[in-house]
Amino acid sequence: EDMHRLDHDGFAFAELAVVIAVLAILAAFAIPRFVALQTEARQASVEALAGSVRSGAALAHALWLADGRPATVSMQGRSIAMTNGYPDRGTIDDTVADVSGFSYDDATGVFTKLGTRRDCFVAYSPAASADDAPAVDVATHGCR
């Protein structure tokens, strides 16, 4: 009886090869889906920041109107410089509560998503005249 019984203390080479093959096939399908999800998440965060910038500019404009059109308004204890009734490039980032994950260049008005290639950003341009609203442009095709 003892001669017919096999001691089996682990995986045989064939079993191990099958497990590795199955994992490789799963990875071949999962990795591209994961990369696509990361891209979609970056794009969504850029779109969300654009919405926050628009909201911050609109709120500052409302405060500007309510306060009698001063040169600056106060938002969350910060002084926001106004140009044609909307925040200027130097202070628009102060109207947004959270800009983590982005770098901001106040000379250009561009919020760039960190860890991405170029063309993954939100660009703010102040109002050109008193009758205009600021422009908030979004680029997401480089959010890979």
Image: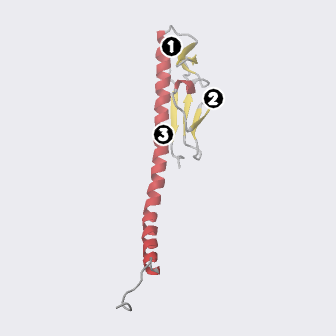
Give the image quarter of residue 16: bottom left
Q: Amino acid at mark 3?
A: Ser
Judging depth in this view, the residue of 56 and 134 nearest the camera is: 56
Q: Secondary structure at mark 1?
A: helix
| Sequence-first disc among 2 and 1 | 1
Q: Amino acid at mark 2?
A: Asp
Q: Amino acid at mark 1?
A: Trp
Mark 2 crowdedness (10 Å alpha carbons): few <14, some 14-19, many ≥20: some
Q: Secondary structure at mark 3?
A: helix
Measured along the vertical axis of the image, is residue 70 above or below residue 1?
A: above
- Looking at the image, residue 55 sits to the left or right of residue 80; the answer is left
How far apart marks 2 and 1 lie (CA) works out to 21 Å
| Image x and y of residue 18, in percent | 43, 75
Q: Residue at x 54, y 22 (%)?
A: 127
Kindly identify which residue carries mark 2.
106
Q: Secondary structure at mark 2?
A: loop
- Residue at the extreme front: 2
How far apart marks 3 and 2 lie (CA) works out to 20 Å
Number of callouts: 3
C-beta proximity under 8 Å, tags 3 and 1: no
Q: Residue at x 48, y 49 (%)?
A: 38
Kindly identify which residue carries mark 3.
45
Depth-wise, is mark 3 or mark 2 nearer the camera? 3
Q: Which mark is residue 135?
A: none
Q: Residue at x 50, y 28 (%)?
A: 53
Kindly identify which residue carries mark 1.
64
| Sequence-first disc among 3 and 2 | 3
| Sequence-first disc among 3 and 1 | 3
Depth-wise, is mark 3 or mark 1 nearer the camera? 3
| Image x and y of residue 128, in percent | 56, 22
